[in-house]
Image: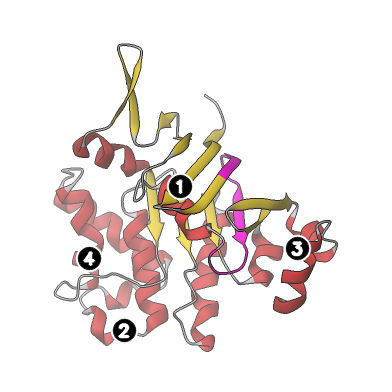
Protein backbone atom coordinates (compact mmCIF):
# COMPACT_ATOMS: atom_id res chain seq x y z
CA UNK A 1 0.00 0.00 0.00
CA UNK A 2 1.37 3.41 -0.95
CA UNK A 3 2.06 5.83 1.87
CA UNK A 4 0.86 8.80 -0.21
CA UNK A 5 -2.45 10.08 1.20
CA UNK A 6 -2.84 13.20 -0.97
CA UNK A 7 -1.44 13.82 -4.43
CA UNK A 8 -2.31 17.12 -6.12
CA UNK A 9 -0.99 18.02 -9.54
CA UNK A 10 -1.58 21.21 -11.50
CA UNK A 11 -4.66 22.17 -9.46
CA UNK A 12 -6.49 25.13 -10.98
CA UNK A 13 -9.56 26.86 -9.57
CA UNK A 14 -11.26 29.91 -11.04
CA UNK A 15 -14.22 31.93 -9.88
CA UNK A 16 -15.26 33.60 -13.11
CA UNK A 17 -12.33 35.74 -14.20
CA UNK A 18 -10.65 35.43 -10.79
CA UNK A 19 -7.86 32.84 -10.91
CA UNK A 20 -7.63 31.62 -7.32
CA UNK A 21 -5.41 28.55 -7.76
CA UNK A 22 -2.91 28.64 -10.61
CA UNK A 23 -1.42 25.17 -10.66
CA UNK A 24 -0.80 23.69 -7.20
CA UNK A 25 1.39 20.60 -6.79
CA UNK A 26 1.50 18.82 -3.45
CA UNK A 27 2.28 15.35 -2.08
CA UNK A 28 1.35 14.42 1.48
CA UNK A 29 2.41 11.11 3.01
CA UNK A 30 0.78 9.12 5.77
CA UNK A 31 1.33 10.64 9.20
CA UNK A 32 2.66 13.97 7.94
CA UNK A 33 1.48 17.34 9.24
CA UNK A 34 1.53 19.87 6.41
CA UNK A 35 1.00 23.50 7.39
CA UNK A 36 -0.03 26.11 4.82
CA UNK A 37 0.60 29.79 5.49
CA UNK A 38 0.19 32.94 3.45
CA UNK A 39 -1.70 36.22 3.22
CA UNK A 40 -5.49 36.43 3.00
CA UNK A 41 -6.70 35.73 -0.51
CA UNK A 42 -3.74 33.56 -1.45
CA UNK A 43 -5.92 30.49 -2.11
CA UNK A 44 -5.15 28.49 1.04
CA UNK A 45 -8.73 27.80 2.10
CA UNK A 46 -9.87 27.26 -1.48
CA UNK A 47 -7.24 24.55 -1.86
CA UNK A 48 -8.53 22.77 1.24
CA UNK A 49 -12.09 23.01 -0.09
CA UNK A 50 -10.92 21.47 -3.37
CA UNK A 51 -9.37 18.54 -1.49
CA UNK A 52 -12.67 17.96 0.31
CA UNK A 53 -14.75 18.40 -2.88
CA UNK A 54 -16.50 21.49 -1.58
CA UNK A 55 -15.20 23.19 -4.73
CA UNK A 56 -14.82 21.59 -8.15
CA UNK A 57 -11.53 21.77 -10.04
CA UNK A 58 -11.05 23.71 -13.26
CA UNK A 59 -7.79 21.95 -14.04
CA UNK A 60 -5.39 19.34 -12.72
CA UNK A 61 -6.34 16.58 -10.33
CA UNK A 62 -6.33 15.55 -6.67
CA UNK A 63 -6.12 11.97 -5.42
CA UNK A 64 -6.97 11.20 -1.78
CA UNK A 65 -6.34 7.75 -0.32
CA UNK A 66 -5.93 6.35 -3.83
CA UNK A 67 -9.21 7.76 -5.16
CA UNK A 68 -9.55 10.73 -7.57
CA UNK A 69 -11.42 13.65 -6.01
CA UNK A 70 -14.68 14.55 -7.71
CA UNK A 71 -14.14 12.39 -10.79
CA UNK A 72 -14.11 8.74 -11.83
CA UNK A 73 -12.87 6.72 -14.77
CA UNK A 74 -15.59 5.05 -16.80
CA UNK A 75 -14.88 3.21 -20.06
CA UNK A 76 -11.56 5.01 -20.31
CA UNK A 77 -13.16 8.45 -19.90
CA UNK A 78 -13.05 10.87 -16.98
CA UNK A 79 -16.52 11.68 -15.65
CA UNK A 80 -17.82 13.67 -12.71
CA UNK A 81 -18.87 11.67 -9.67
CA UNK A 82 -22.51 11.55 -8.68
CA UNK A 83 -23.51 13.22 -5.42
CA UNK A 84 -23.69 9.82 -3.73
CA UNK A 85 -20.25 8.80 -5.01
CA UNK A 86 -18.79 12.13 -3.98
CA UNK A 87 -20.23 11.84 -0.46
CA UNK A 88 -18.83 8.32 -0.14
CA UNK A 89 -15.34 9.36 -1.18
CA UNK A 90 -15.42 12.25 1.32
CA UNK A 91 -15.75 9.73 4.14
CA UNK A 92 -11.95 9.45 4.08
CA UNK A 93 -11.63 13.18 4.85
CA UNK A 94 -12.47 15.09 8.01
CA UNK A 95 -12.60 18.88 7.93
CA UNK A 96 -12.64 21.47 10.71
CA UNK A 97 -13.60 25.02 9.74
CA UNK A 98 -13.00 28.47 11.23
CA UNK A 99 -16.59 28.49 12.49
CA UNK A 100 -17.68 25.50 14.50
CA UNK A 101 -20.84 24.61 12.53
CA UNK A 102 -22.32 22.49 15.31
CA UNK A 103 -26.03 21.70 15.21
CA UNK A 104 -27.47 23.98 17.93
CA UNK A 105 -30.52 21.78 18.58
CA UNK A 106 -28.41 18.69 19.31
CA UNK A 107 -26.33 17.85 22.35
CA UNK A 108 -22.58 17.48 22.02
CA UNK A 109 -22.94 13.69 21.92
CA UNK A 110 -25.67 13.85 19.29
CA UNK A 111 -23.55 16.17 17.14
CA UNK A 112 -20.74 13.63 17.10
CA UNK A 113 -22.94 10.61 16.48
CA UNK A 114 -25.07 12.08 13.70
CA UNK A 115 -22.85 11.53 10.64
CA UNK A 116 -21.62 7.97 11.34
CA UNK A 117 -25.19 6.83 11.97
CA UNK A 118 -26.86 8.66 9.08
CA UNK A 119 -24.10 8.57 6.46
CA UNK A 120 -22.25 5.34 7.23
CA UNK A 121 -25.28 3.54 8.71
CA UNK A 122 -23.25 2.39 11.69
CA UNK A 123 -24.72 0.80 14.80
CA UNK A 124 -25.91 3.49 17.22
CA UNK A 125 -24.43 1.84 20.33
CA UNK A 126 -21.01 1.41 18.68
CA UNK A 127 -21.01 5.02 17.47
CA UNK A 128 -22.02 6.30 20.90
CA UNK A 129 -19.15 4.43 22.54
CA UNK A 130 -16.70 5.84 19.99
CA UNK A 131 -18.09 9.35 20.48
CA UNK A 132 -17.58 9.19 24.24
CA UNK A 133 -14.01 7.97 23.70
CA UNK A 134 -13.38 10.90 21.36
CA UNK A 135 -14.89 13.36 23.83
CA UNK A 136 -12.55 12.00 26.49
CA UNK A 137 -9.68 12.45 24.03
CA UNK A 138 -10.49 16.15 23.58
CA UNK A 139 -11.17 16.62 27.30
CA UNK A 140 -14.93 17.13 27.09
CA UNK A 141 -16.58 13.87 28.11
CA UNK A 142 -18.33 15.73 30.95
CA UNK A 143 -20.07 17.91 28.35
CA UNK A 144 -21.66 15.03 26.41
CA UNK A 145 -25.23 16.09 27.22
CA UNK A 146 -24.57 19.83 26.92
CA UNK A 147 -25.83 21.94 24.02
CA UNK A 148 -23.32 23.96 21.96
CA UNK A 149 -24.64 27.34 23.15
CA UNK A 150 -23.46 26.53 26.67
CA UNK A 151 -19.86 25.90 25.54
CA UNK A 152 -16.98 28.30 25.05
CA UNK A 153 -15.57 28.80 21.56
CA UNK A 154 -12.60 26.59 22.33
CA UNK A 155 -14.85 23.85 23.63
CA UNK A 156 -17.06 24.05 20.55
CA UNK A 157 -14.03 23.74 18.28
CA UNK A 158 -12.83 20.70 20.21
CA UNK A 159 -16.27 19.14 19.74
CA UNK A 160 -16.01 19.93 16.01
CA UNK A 161 -12.68 18.07 15.91
CA UNK A 162 -14.21 15.08 17.70
CA UNK A 163 -17.15 15.14 15.28
CA UNK A 164 -14.79 15.00 12.29
CA UNK A 165 -12.81 12.16 13.88
CA UNK A 166 -15.98 10.16 14.47
CA UNK A 167 -16.07 9.32 10.76
CA UNK A 168 -12.64 7.68 11.18
CA UNK A 169 -11.03 9.66 8.34
CA UNK A 170 -7.60 8.97 6.87
CA UNK A 171 -6.99 12.70 6.42
CA UNK A 172 -7.87 15.71 8.57
CA UNK A 173 -8.11 19.22 7.10
CA UNK A 174 -8.04 22.27 9.38
CA UNK A 175 -8.98 25.67 7.94
CA UNK A 176 -7.60 28.25 10.39
CA UNK A 177 -9.27 26.43 13.31
CA UNK A 178 -8.20 28.99 15.92
CA UNK A 179 -8.87 32.22 14.03
CA UNK A 180 -12.36 32.70 15.51
CA UNK A 181 -11.23 32.09 19.09
CA UNK A 182 -10.29 34.47 21.85
CA UNK A 183 -6.51 34.34 22.41
CA UNK A 184 -6.77 32.51 25.74
CA UNK A 185 -8.76 29.67 24.09
CA UNK A 186 -6.35 29.02 21.24
CA UNK A 187 -4.02 26.79 23.27
CA UNK A 188 -6.64 24.20 24.17
CA UNK A 189 -7.46 23.59 20.50
CA UNK A 190 -3.80 23.46 19.45
CA UNK A 191 -3.14 20.95 22.24
CA UNK A 192 -5.77 18.62 20.75
CA UNK A 193 -4.20 19.01 17.32
CA UNK A 194 -0.75 18.25 18.75
CA UNK A 195 -2.21 15.07 20.22
CA UNK A 196 -3.56 14.05 16.83
CA UNK A 197 -0.17 14.66 15.23
CA UNK A 198 1.55 12.59 17.93
CA UNK A 199 -0.93 9.78 17.24
CA UNK A 200 0.06 9.74 13.56
CA UNK A 201 -2.95 11.46 11.98
CA UNK A 202 -2.28 12.85 8.50
CA UNK A 203 -3.16 16.55 8.64
CA UNK A 204 -3.24 19.61 6.40
CA UNK A 205 -3.50 22.79 8.47
CA UNK A 206 -4.10 26.29 7.13
CA UNK A 207 -2.90 28.43 9.99
CA UNK A 208 -1.52 31.73 11.23
CA UNK A 209 -0.07 29.97 14.30
CA UNK A 210 3.61 30.00 13.36
CA UNK A 211 4.64 28.41 16.65
CA UNK A 212 2.43 25.42 15.91
CA UNK A 213 3.80 25.16 12.38
CA UNK A 214 7.36 25.29 13.67
CA UNK A 215 6.82 22.80 16.49
CA UNK A 216 4.40 20.28 14.99
CA UNK A 217 4.65 20.62 11.21
CA UNK A 218 6.64 18.22 9.05
CA UNK A 219 6.25 20.37 5.94
CA UNK A 220 5.49 24.08 5.51
CA UNK A 221 4.01 25.66 2.39
CA UNK A 222 3.89 29.40 1.76
CA UNK A 223 1.22 30.41 -0.77
CA UNK A 224 0.62 33.77 -2.42
CA UNK A 225 -1.69 34.75 -5.30
CA UNK A 226 -2.71 31.17 -6.00
CA UNK A 227 0.82 29.75 -6.20
CA UNK A 228 3.16 27.82 -3.93
CA UNK A 229 6.00 30.31 -3.50
CA UNK A 230 8.15 28.30 -1.11
CA UNK A 231 8.00 25.01 0.75
CA UNK A 232 10.19 22.85 2.93
CA UNK A 233 11.01 22.03 6.53
CA UNK A 234 9.06 24.47 8.75
CA UNK A 235 12.08 25.45 10.83
CA UNK A 236 14.13 26.15 7.70
CA UNK A 237 11.42 28.18 5.95
CA UNK A 238 10.56 30.21 9.04
CA UNK A 239 14.14 30.85 10.10
CA UNK A 240 15.80 31.26 6.70
CA UNK A 241 13.22 31.84 3.93
CA UNK A 242 14.73 31.74 0.45
CA UNK A 243 12.13 33.76 -1.44
CA UNK A 244 11.78 37.54 -1.05
CA UNK A 245 7.98 37.31 -0.88
CA UNK A 246 8.21 34.79 1.97
CA UNK A 247 10.62 37.10 3.79
CA UNK A 248 8.21 40.03 3.41
CA UNK A 249 5.29 38.02 4.77
CA UNK A 250 7.18 36.54 7.72
CA UNK A 251 8.59 39.96 8.66
CA UNK A 252 5.01 41.07 9.33
CA UNK A 253 3.74 38.01 11.21
CA UNK A 254 6.70 36.81 13.28
Label 3 – label 1 distance at C-alpha: 22 Å
Label 3 – label 2 distance at C-alpha: 40 Å
For mark 1, what is the residue? 13
Left or right? Give the position of 194 relative to 241.
Answer: left
Circles 3 and 4, Cβ within 8 Å, touching? The answer is no
- Residue at the extreme front: 17
Image label count: 4
The mark nearer the N terminus, 3 or 2, is: 2
What residue range appears in magenta? 23-41
User: Mark 3 or mark 4: which is in front?
Assistant: 3
User: Mark 2 or mark 1: which is in front?
Assistant: 1
Q: Is residue 82 above or below residue 31?
A: above
What number is the disc on residue 245? 3
Label 2 – label 4 distance at C-alpha: 13 Å
Q: Residue at x 19, y 76 (%)?
A: 104
Q: SS of the residue at dot 4?
A: helix
Rendered image quadrant of residue 36: bottom right
Q: Residue at x 33, y 25 (%)?
A: 72
Magenta stretch secondary structure, dominant:
strand
Asked whether residue 201 appears in the rendered view, the answer is no
Q: Magenta segment: does it hold 37? A: yes
Q: SS of the residue at dot 1?
A: strand
Q: SS of the residue at dot 3?
A: helix
Left or right? Give the position of 30 relative to 248.
Answer: left
For mark 2, what is the residue? 151
For mark 4, what is the residue? 111
User: Mark 3 or mark 2: which is in front?
Assistant: 3
The mark nearer the N terminus, 1 or 4, is: 1
Label 3 – label 4 distance at C-alpha: 42 Å
- Residue at the extreme top: 75
Amino acid sequence: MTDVVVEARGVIKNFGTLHVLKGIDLTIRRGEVTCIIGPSGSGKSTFLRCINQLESLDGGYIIVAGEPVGVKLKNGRVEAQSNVESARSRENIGMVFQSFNLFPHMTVLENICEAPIRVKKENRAIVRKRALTLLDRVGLVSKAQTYPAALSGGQQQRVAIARALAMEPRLMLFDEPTSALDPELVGEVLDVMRGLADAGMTMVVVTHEMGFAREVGDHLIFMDEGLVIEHGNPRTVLNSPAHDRTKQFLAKVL
